[in-house]
Image: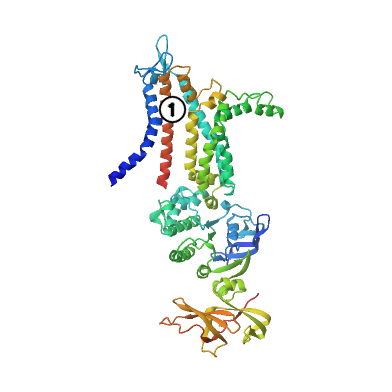
Amino acid sequence: MAQSRTRTAWLLSTPALVVLFCAAAGPLMIVLVYSFLSPGEYSGVVWDPTLEAWFRVLFRRDIFDGTVSLADAHLTIFWRSVKLSLLTTLITFVIGLPTAWFIATRPARSRPLWLFLITIPFWTNLLIRTFAIMQVIRNEGILNTALLKIGLIDSPIQLLNTDTAVLIGMAYVYLPLMVLPLFAAIDRFDFRLIEAAYDLYASRWRVLRRIILPIIRPGIVAGSILVFVPSLGAYVTPRVLGGGRNMMLGNFIELQFGQGRNWPLGAALSMVLLVIVTLALLVYVRASSRDEERG
Amino acid sequence: MTTTAIEARAVTKRFGAGEITALDAVSISIAQGEFFTLLGPSGCGKTTLLRCIAGFETPTDGAILLSGSDITASPPNKRNVNTVFQSYALFPHLTVAQNIGFGLKMRGDDAAKVDKRTEEMLALVKMEQMASRRPEQLSGGQQQRVALARALAPAPEVLLLDEPLSALDLKLRKEMQSELKRLQSETGITFVFVTHDQEEALTMSDRIAVMSHGQLQQVGSPREIYTRPVNRFVADFIGETNFLEAEAKGDSVTLSTGDTLPLPGAGTGPITLAVRPELLRLTEPGEGDLTATVRDSVYFGTDWHCHLLLSDGTEVVARMQSPPTGESGIGKGQPVGLAFAPGALRVLED
């Protein structure tokens, strides 16, 4: 009986397992295998197993004398990706917390409307939204024109094609991903605890730090992961707003599969990105399982 | 000479654009070490008054004094007053011990002092075994004890309790009632207790303030409130009462039934008389002060409640102790006599 039920369960989950294999595990295996092969002449790979791609993730070999040195261009890109992703997470949190708080404290009747407004940007294609931001921040754009008009600046601020532009774009794009889990956490928060803490001699700042933030932490962690992970692999935003020079991991990987014609290196870099993301998720799991222990 | 712990001077609180008056010029003086109860139906303003004392609400008008100094404008974290909340409001991410120590820590006590006081408090509420538990691992009664310990730990001048027992079942509530009395006498702290349960108020309080529609109706000891209610609201809200319409003529009253009874100092004009059911006695027909017919009788174990109809149709309830057999010996429709115990008739102010 129990055995047949197990078999039924397996049979029923077969379609899901097939999709999961074809769409996730399979391609991932291909990427992994490619990272150990040699690049083809024009693109693709040739069946010549080597660790060269993995070596080149971190090091470079001089063409003429063969000396090995750190590939600091790669490290700069890694560092910029992580730095911009962390900053994006921080910015979305600082903006998202008051936003989520505002929505969660509205009357129950108007909350769906606010949440709906938060999700409206998702209705438009990312590329179009990113070009729209470009119109706002470019030298002849709305922002600079307005600032020049009111006399706050004498010459346009160069925002486009800088890290700041990428940051603005990513914060804008990923803000809803921070607001929604924060809202879910604050929605469940018992506001009477604020009065209880305030009654027990806690200042407003301490109420925030000792009571509110620890209790809504699952929402903070979830929102941070939801923003950090896609930021790390962001492609469109850094490409459009950062120009060609300020590459992030996503653009760098694309470059290897495109103009760089080095698929194995692209594959190896993809795996590196995957590892960073997995590490971030592990932090998340650990943080939320600590909540489980706390109950 | 008793000193005053809390004084409210003509405290008025209006909500919205002033259209809802939750408190209407309430003046009250609570003595040091007193167990003082604010009693009234929901919406009477008792919780609003408590929140004004705690500092969660700012009075629209009037002043609140703590040990003689005006605290009307100071925020809750600057008042030496702590609250036990109806929902307990324990911090879910902190242990029992951390919850109890929270106020001490926020006040800036050093770690050793916090630990020592926390242990004292755990012992006071008999929760030593639970120190490292989280609030959700505790039963309702245990959470209640932690909430009490947390509020008592900083040794406030006044402890405010906002219907703290309403979430507990009857048996536990009785236990916590005596526990609260014990804690109050052991700590000597002034307790201001809010409840809508008149029995709770009568059994626990030194003094009771009965409130209705944002106004004080009567302040007095439980016995005063029960035996000498000043108006119809108090008489009706505290215990059961029979109301009799009557015409006062100097030292006697004529009831709506036409019977005239002596009542010294009754005054003149139409009045309302209040009689507690336990002060009515059934007699043989023709004897006693009035005649009545039994409409129904209900057995309550310790006593029988007899619903009687007077000759003019007024319904009154008489309560009589159950005899050992449990039989009342009274049947529906039976004519009986009704006698008032001496002093049973009380003239109400309005």
Residue at image position (52%, 29%) is: A84
Q: Could you say where residue B69 lies in the image, as x and y percent from the top left?
A: 62, 58
Residue at image position (33%, 39%) is: A11
- In the rendered image of this protein, does residue A100 appear above or below residue B58? above
Would residue A203 be seen by someone viewing this image from the given angle? Answer: yes
Frontmost residue, A150 versus A2: A2
Residue denoted by label 1? A273
Label 1 sits on what residue type?
Leu
Give the image quarter of residue A160: top right
- Coloring scheme of the render? rainbow
Q: Could you say where residue B135 lies in the image, as x and y percent from the top left?
A: 44, 52
Residue at image position (65%, 83%) is: B265
Q: Could you say where residue A40 lies in the image, as x and y percent from the top left?
A: 40, 15
- The chain containing the residue under callout 1 comes to A
Would residue A58 be seen by someone viewing this image from the given angle? Answer: no
Q: How many numbered marks appear?
A: 1
Q: Residues within 10 Å of mark 1 (few under 14, many from 20)?
A: many
- In the rendered image of this protein, does residue A245 appear above or below residue B126? above
Give the image quarter of residue A131: top right
Of all residues shown, which one is farthest toward the bottom?
B286
Left or right placement of residue A281 versus residue B342 in this view? left
Frontmost residue, A257 versus B173: A257
Q: Could you say where residue B36 lies in the image, as x and y percent from the top left?
A: 55, 65
Frontmost residue, B245 versus B119: B245
In the structure shown, which secondary structural element does the residue marked by tag 1 occupy? helix
